[in-house]
Image: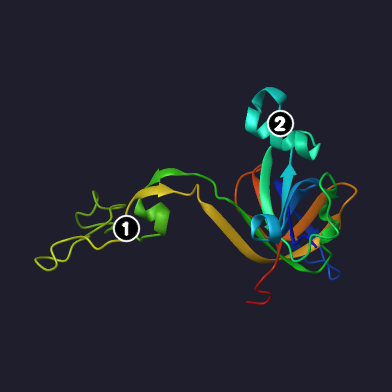
Amino acid sequence: MVRGIIGKKVGMTQVFDESGKAFPVTAIEAGPCPVVQIKTEDQDGYQAVQLGFGNRKDNKVNQPERGHIDKAGVTPPRVLFEFPVDDTDQLSVGSMIDSSIFSVGEYVDVTGTSKGLGFTGVVKRYGFAGGKKSHGGEQDLRRTGSIGASAHPSRVFKGKRMAGRHGGRRVTVQNLQVIQADADRSLLLVKGAVPGPTNGFLLINKAVKIGA
């Protein structure tokens, strides 16, 4: 059985439990995802299923992609991604995978691309305290401070936290609880926040470290 699905972040809201306490949830448009290709141990050396998500205009599809998609008999998807499977016997090319593979109460791992914030300093990027707020420190409020080590070793260590590109990287948030799974509306509600902006693409997998 497929352990994951491709989705799109719709936004955040809140729901209430039995006691009336509110907690945040993220709404995800999870599927439906057509099966575009099935990888087998005999032919490919491993077992996996390639799923598609979304729609793409015909004039945005190149020749190799067109041949691959026409072979599967599906409309051009916006995103393609592979998910490992233990058994491919119950899968067929062209069939649909939806959010019904998840059940309420189970935990999932959500992967996405975090929001790109551009070039930022160490205060915003790493939470540095900054310099003195008085006694001549007016020019050092958000500076890095010393990055060297005097005469020895006379260099900046690799990996030193400094100003630079912030965000725009692949991030996985683990163990988010499924609050609602509505296959009819292709809707998945998970407790908490997920990486990326609204309308950003996500990979939703069954959790591998439950309770970790």
- Tell me the quarter of the image containing the C terminus: bottom right
Residue at point 40%, 58% (across, down): 126
Horizontal side of 69 relative to 113 (left or right) equals right
Which residue is the extreme one toward the right?
184
Front one among 196 and 16? 196
Residue extending farthest bottom: 211
Asked which secondary structure carries label 2, the reply is loop
Mark 2: amino acid: Arg
For residue 158, above or below residue 199: below
Task: Compare residues 24 and 191 and report the one nearer the observer.
Answer: 191
Gap between marks 2 and 1 measured at Cα: 47 Å
Badge 2 crowding class, 10 Å Cα cut-off, few under 14, some 14 to 19, many 20 or more, is few
Q: Pointer 2 and pointer 1: residues touching (CB < 8 Å)?
A: no
Residue 135 in the image: x percent, y percent?
20, 58
- Which amino acid is tagged 1? Gly
In the displayed structure, 136 sits above or below 197; it is: below
Spot occupied by residue 198 in the image (x, y as percentages of width and height): 66, 43
Kindly identify the residue that appears in the image at 65 percent across and 26 percent down: 60
Q: Residue at x 13, y 63 (%)?
A: 154
Outermost residue on the left side: it is: 151
Residue drawn at (69%, 31%) of the image: 66
Task: Mark 2 or mark 1: name the one nearer the start of the chain.
Answer: 2
Measured from the top left, where is residue 6 in percent x and y? 72, 50
- Residue for badge 1: 130
Q: Which mark is residue 118?
A: none
Residue 157, position in %: x, y? 24, 63
Q: In this figure, which residue is indicated by the disc labeled 2?
A: 56
Q: Is residue 202 left or right of residue 97?
A: left
Quadrant containing the N terminus in the rendered view: bottom right
Q: Residues within 10 Å of mark 1 (few under 14, many from 20)?
A: some
Q: Secondary structure at mark 1?
A: loop
